């Protein structure tokens, strides 16, 4: 089994030979990752613009104390009047600054006396004028390729009149759970050895949360022929196939063998981690198979560690999961000479993270309820030892 850090390096160093992209309407692009740089094709604003409601004036005329209102300049109008000495033009937020004016004096700073303004409070020269290119300049890269599109990016692209945008296609992820004991949702239990499947549903939810397109294939029996058929079909339909169960060393653990027999190149099989040491990652061209363990907590943790980065890799995106430093509010007992990922409760108080283990059960890798609550994963390396209250630890945040 390889070191956890080595396995992550191997995932990070994987290359996709042919990325899939598509062009979609801007308002359908939220949640996708840009496949092109967004470059400004004009200055914003293109001309000096008023930032407030007020009066466009020549700054030197402020000393006069009283200035004649020559005309009105509503936003959006193509006003051709110029400001000349001793006059001003009433101007509104977003209006082009009239020629001749070098300052905008706000409405709040004046009193209107017939066709004149009386200046109560002076302002510096250039006050409240948006300069050409204040927002962005022509030729400036505004959004980089590889950025996930959200409301700020949509707003900026709309201001550039970009109605369609090129994005990376979200990878299709086929989800398969293996196990003759598994029951799908709604399926009737006929003997006490049967258990309700949760792995395929939580994996589908993880795929959807982290911007893949899930393809639910359900539960299949521990039968090599069936497993071979389903994984083979899934490889034709999907970019990533994720399985649970069948990667350990039992008599009916066929998945690991089927992956090899289908001509896939094994990237690694077995990592010194707890939970999930029997994880397997393989590829066939630009398609990937991730064989996860069968226990629910184990498959969930390893999906976060390995499946999520693969989904992001297909879109050249940045990592959603991230580590923070936190302080222990309860002792932590190191239980294995492996990299451990332990469910913990995380809280943020006065800008600092804290973790504890209240209601977190100690037991096998099947305790999925440990993922409930304000949960994160406390990360310890092979060389770490047990920790005391107040110690600083690394915590993986995924929500």
Image: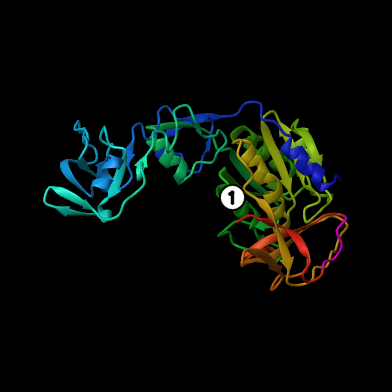
Q: Nearer the viewer, residue 203 or 305?
A: 305
User: Is the magenta region chiefly helix, strand or loop?
Assistant: loop
The residue located at (68%, 63%) in the rendering is: 368
Residue 185 drawn at (x, y percent): 57, 58
Residue 73 drawn at (x, y percent): 20, 40
Q: Is residue 198 visible?
A: yes
* Image position of 89 (left or right of 142): left
Picture colour scheme: rainbow
Residue at the front extreme, as displayed: 64
* Image position of 135 (left or right of 311): left
> Can you tell which quarter of the image residue 316 is in?
top right
The stretch of residues the image draws in magenta is 383-387
Q: Nearer the viewer, residue 285 or 165?
A: 165
Q: Nearer the viewer, residue 193 or 309?
A: 309
Q: Nearer the viewer, residue 225 or 337?
A: 337
Residue 337 drawn at (x, y percent): 88, 57
- For disc 1, the neighbor class at 10 Å (few under 14, some 14 to 19, many from 20) is many
Residue 183 drawn at (x, y percent): 63, 58
Quadrant placement of the C terminus: bottom right
> Can you tell which quarter of the image residue 101 is in?
top left
Tally of numbered tags: 1
> Can you tell which quarter of the image residue 265 is in?
top right
As for residue 201 lying within the magenta part, the answer is no
Q: Which residue is mark 1?
A: 204
Q: Is residue 221 visible?
A: no
- Label 1 element class: helix
Vertical placement of residue 258 versus 383, above or below: above
């Amino acid at each position: 089994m390889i070191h956890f850090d080595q396995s992550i390096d191997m995932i990070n160093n994987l290359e996709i030979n042919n990325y899939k992209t598509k062009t979609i309407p801007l308002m359908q692009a939220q949640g996708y990752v840009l496949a092109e740089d967004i470059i400004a094709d004009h200055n914003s604003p293109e001309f000096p613009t008023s930032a407030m409601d007020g009066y466009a004036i020549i700054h030197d005329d402020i000393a006069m104390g009283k200035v004649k209102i020559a005309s009105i300049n509503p936003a959006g109008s193509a006003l051709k009047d110029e400001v000349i000495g001793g006059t001003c033009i009433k101007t509104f937020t977003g209006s082009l600054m009239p020629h001749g004016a070098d300052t905008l004096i706000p409405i709040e700073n004046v009193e209107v006396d017939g066709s004149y303004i009386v200046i109560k409070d002076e302002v510096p020269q250039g006050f409240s004028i948006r300069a050409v290119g204040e927002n962005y300049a022509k030729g400036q890269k505004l959004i980089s390729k590889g950025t996930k599109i959200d409301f700020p990016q949509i707003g900026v692209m709309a201001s550039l009149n970009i109605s369609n945008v090129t994005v990376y296609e979200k990878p299709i992820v086929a989800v398969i759970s293996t196990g003759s004991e598994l029951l799908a949702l709604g399926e009737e239990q006929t003997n006490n050895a049967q258990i309700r499947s949760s792995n395929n549903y939580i994996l589908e939810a993880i795929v959807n949360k982290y911007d893949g397109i899930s393809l639910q294939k359900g539960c299949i029996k521990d039968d090599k022929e069936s497993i071979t058929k389903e994984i083979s079909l899934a490889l034709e339909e999907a970019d990533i196939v994720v399985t649970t169960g069948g990667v350990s060393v039992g008599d009916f653990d066929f998945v690991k063998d089927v992956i090899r027999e289908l001509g896939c190149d094994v990237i690694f099989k077995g990592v010194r981690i707890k939970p999930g040491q029997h994880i397997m990652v393989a590829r066939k061209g630009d398609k990937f198979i991730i064989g996860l363990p069968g226990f629910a907590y184990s498959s969930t943790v390893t999906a976060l560690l390995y499946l999520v980065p693969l989904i992001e890799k297909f879109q050249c995106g940045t990592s959603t999961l991230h580590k923070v430093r936190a302080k222990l509010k309860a002792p932590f007992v190191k239980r294995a000479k492996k990299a451990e990922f332990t469910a913990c409760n995380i809280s943020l108080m006065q800008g600092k993270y804290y973790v504890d283990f209240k209601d977190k059960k100690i037991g096998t890798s099947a305790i999925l309820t440990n993922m409930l609550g304000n949960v994160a994963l406390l990360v310890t390396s092979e060389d770490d030892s047990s920790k005391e209250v107040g110690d600083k630890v690394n915590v993986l945040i995924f929500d």
